[in-house]
Image (tube, rainbow, N blue to C red):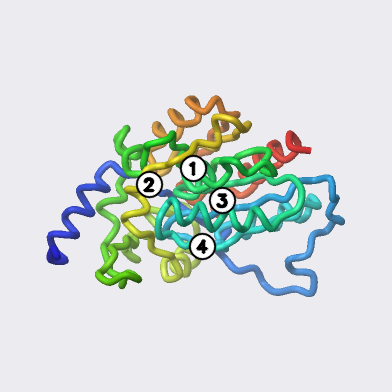
Amino acid sequence: MNSPISRRTVAVSLLAGAAALGTPGAAFATPSPSPTQGLPSRRHRHDQPTIVLIHGAFADASSWSAVVERLQRQGHHALAPALPLRGLASDAAYIRSVLDSIPGPIVLVGHSYGGAVISVAAADTPQVKALVYIAAFVPDVGESALELTGKYPGSTLAQATSSQYYPLPGGGEGEELIIKQELFREQFAAGVPARTTQVMAVGQRPIALAALQERATAAAWKKLPSWCLVATEDRNIPPAAEQWMAERAHAHTVKVRAPHAVAVSDPAPVTELILRAARSAC
């Protein structure tokens, strides 16, 4: 087994030029409780698709909070499941099991690494009618997240992360990456209030290095209409890489001057793009 120092060196070199995973903001903040919190202001229309929101690395489902509130006010049903962040194939299989439990049409949304997950999970899942990529990976078959982030310069993620280790079911250790708390705001959530990012940094979910290295086995965007949001201030995934992937997918694309965690810092344009996709799926 390699020593922790040599393994860390490998992790950093693999992530050099890796995706500028961005900057979340207010969406991670927990809103003040109220008697109607979490309830949509309009009755859900059953002819509308269910919107399923998949978070990425160094985040959790709460990163979608501000977007969910806006979708609910528009009468949409939204679901934001937790992603294991352990391997692309296994994460996609888990999300596919969630999709299989939902009746009716689905709009599937992915942020960051979650974009790779939805690209695989939506393959051969007929109820998915549209894909939305929010500062996300849009891989083709055979591509990995690390490979795509290295296509263009601009990511500073390698310098901002550290490695930690966890036991594998069959024995041995797996390596996972986490953003150093003191660098979290600058790397992932620039522009978001410091108090919010301090909470986000504490609650961030690490991702297995193997998940970022694993190659996609399907590319659902080749058959489904897609929408992409490019975060022009992203420090995890280079914005040029996001733009290139969006163009390759022939996606309806918007640019927002925002960090990687754009759903937190700028939930309004994120919600509007999702609503455009939802209208196409009705």
**Secondary structure of residue under mark 4:** loop
User: Which residue was labeled with disc 2?
Assistant: 236
Q: Give above or below for 195 relative to 275.
A: below
Of tags 2 and 4, the one toward the viewer is: 4
Give whichever of 151, 238 is nearer the camera. Answer: 151
| Mark toward the start of the polypeptide (2 vs 3) | 2
Q: Which mark is residue 135?
A: 1
Q: Position of residue 167 (x, y in %)?
A: 31, 72
Snapshot quadrant of residue 146: top left
* Cα separation between marks 2 and 3: 15 Å
**Mark 1 nearby-residue class (10 Å; few <14, some 14–19, many ≥20):** many
* Quadrant (top left/top right/bottom left/bottom right) for the C terminus: top right
User: Residue placed at 40% from the left, 33% from the top?
Assistant: 241
**Mark 4 nearby-residue class (10 Å; few <14, some 14–19, many ≥20):** many
User: Which residue was labeled with disc 3?
Assistant: 263
* Cα separation between marks 2 and 4: 16 Å
* Quadrant (top left/top right/bottom left/bottom right) for the N terminus: bottom left
Of tags 4 and 3, the one toward the viewer is: 4
Q: Is residue 205 left or right of residue 210?
A: right
Q: Is residue 87 left or right of residue 155?
A: right
Q: Position of residue 163 (x, y in %)?
A: 26, 63
Q: Which mark is residue 60?
A: 4
